[in-house]
């Protein structure tokens, strides 16, 4: 049976969830394997697949640092490989997919389809304005949208399409440039509230760039220079001990015991 790989980088869980839904749809027609790029098998090779699906979150209208490092790390493929690239975001993606497509083409990975799944739970927005309930919800029609997208991708793969479908340049991104620049230049400090910290090391062990180190008294210490701004550490802290606020801890987050993804809320 023909094989397709679904590869993703997920910060707090949005992209993981969408990737899993895509994998289920693809599994109806192909032998589908799904991997986080942080946990690829030792013998993983892109040559084993007839097509790829690659997903990642938008961080300040730019592809996540982790997905770009992954693409940069792989060898250029000897033959063009058809791919469906997608991103998840709370507000809008601007030219994120267009930027990412250039990285893919340089490795002979050819995006024949692209999609921005807008309106997903916002990793930063839920922390900055937690009273806005919409920021915690997925679009209600996301399952149908994904099914329609995969049907189109299936048809193109079956027809042997390996022609670049370059995402169009979005003019509104020019208006957003000051915000984009500020987002890349400014890193919010992540504060530790020691009275809540259980010293579980979850934030230390699950931060790919290593933005947290252990102090002499076993508390996590945050190093902003390494932060990639996914805020997984805050949303996945089981004790709600991390926050963007120095004065208060978050009342609700997008993971752990408050996990909106696992509960299937608003899906």
Image (cartoon, rainbow, N blue to C red):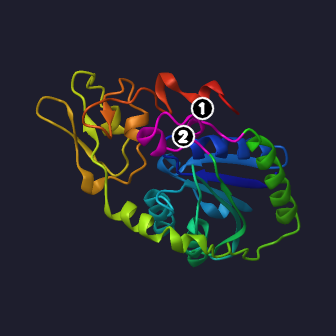
The residue carrying mark 2 is 13
**Quadrant of the frame with the C terminus:** top right
Q: Place residue 24 in its image quadrant.
A: top right
**Residue segment shown in magenta:** 120-139
Q: Residues within 10 Å of mark 2 (few under 14, many from 20)?
A: many
Could you tell which of marks 2 and 1 lies nearer the N-terminus? 2
Specify whether 233 is left or right of 102.
left
Q: Is residue 49 among what the camera can see?
A: no
Q: Which mark is residue 205?
A: none
Q: Is residue 263 magenta?
A: no
Q: Decide if residue 218 is on the left or right side of residue 36.
A: left
Residue 152, compared with residue 34, is above or below; it is below
Q: How far apart are marks 2 and 1 (CA)?
A: 7 Å
Q: Does the magenta stretch include residue 122?
A: yes
Residue 262 percent location from the top left of the image: 60, 27
**Residue that badge 1 annotates:** 261
Which residue is located at x 39 percent, y 68 percent? 181
Residue 259 lies, in percent from the top left, at 54, 27
Q: How crowded is mark 1: few (under 14 residues within 10 Å), some or many (20 or more)?
A: many
Query: Residue 56 vs residue 2: left or right?
Result: left
> From the viewer's perspective, is residue 264 above or below residue 102?
above
Main SS category, magenta section: loop
| Mark 2 element type | loop
Nearer to us in this view, 68 or 125: 125
Residue 125: x, y in percent? Answer: 47, 44
- Tell me if residue 19 can be seen: yes
Asked whether, in this view, residue 2 is left or right of residue 166, the answer is: right
Q: Outermost residue toward the left? A: 216
Check if mark 2's residue and mark 1's residue have beta carbons within 8 Å: yes
Q: Which of 24 and 261 is in front in this view?
A: 261
Of residue 28 and residue 84, the one placed in the foreground of this image is: 84
- Residue 46, given in percent of the width and then of the height, sits at 62, 62
């Amino acid at each position: 049976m023909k094989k397709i790989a679904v590869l993703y980088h997920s910060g707090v869980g949005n992209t993981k969830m969408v990737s899993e839904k895509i994998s289920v749809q693809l599994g109806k027609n192909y032998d589908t394997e799904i991997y986080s790029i942080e946990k690829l098998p030792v013998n993983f090779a892109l040559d084993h697949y007839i097509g790829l699906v690659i997903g990642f979150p938008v961080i300040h209208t730019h592809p996540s640092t982790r997905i770009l490092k992954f693409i940069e790390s792989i060898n250029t493929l000897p033959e063009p490989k058809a791919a469906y690239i997608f991103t998840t975001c709370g507000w809008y993606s601007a030219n994120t997919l267009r930027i990412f497509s250039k990285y893919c083409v340089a490795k002979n990975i050819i995006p024949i389809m692209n999609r921005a799944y807008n309106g997903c739970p916002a990793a930063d927005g839920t922390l900055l304005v937690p009273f806005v309930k919409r920021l915690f919800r997925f679009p209600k029609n996301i399952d149908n949208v994904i099914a329609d997208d995969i049907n189109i991708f299936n048809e193109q793969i079956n027809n042997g399409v390996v022609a670049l479908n370059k995402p169009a340049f979005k003019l509104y991104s020019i208006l957003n440039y000051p915000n984009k620049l500020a987002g890349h230049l400014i890193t919010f400090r992540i504060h530790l509230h020691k009275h809540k910290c259980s010293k579980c090391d979850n934030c230390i062990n699950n931060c790919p760039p290593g933005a947290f180190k252990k102090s002499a008294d076993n508390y996590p210490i945050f190093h902003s220079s390494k932060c990639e701004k996914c805020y997984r550490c805050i949303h996945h802290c089981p004790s709600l001990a991390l926050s963007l606020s120095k004065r208060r801890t978050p009342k609700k987050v997008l993971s752990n015991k408050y996990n909106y993804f696992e509960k299937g809320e608003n899906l």
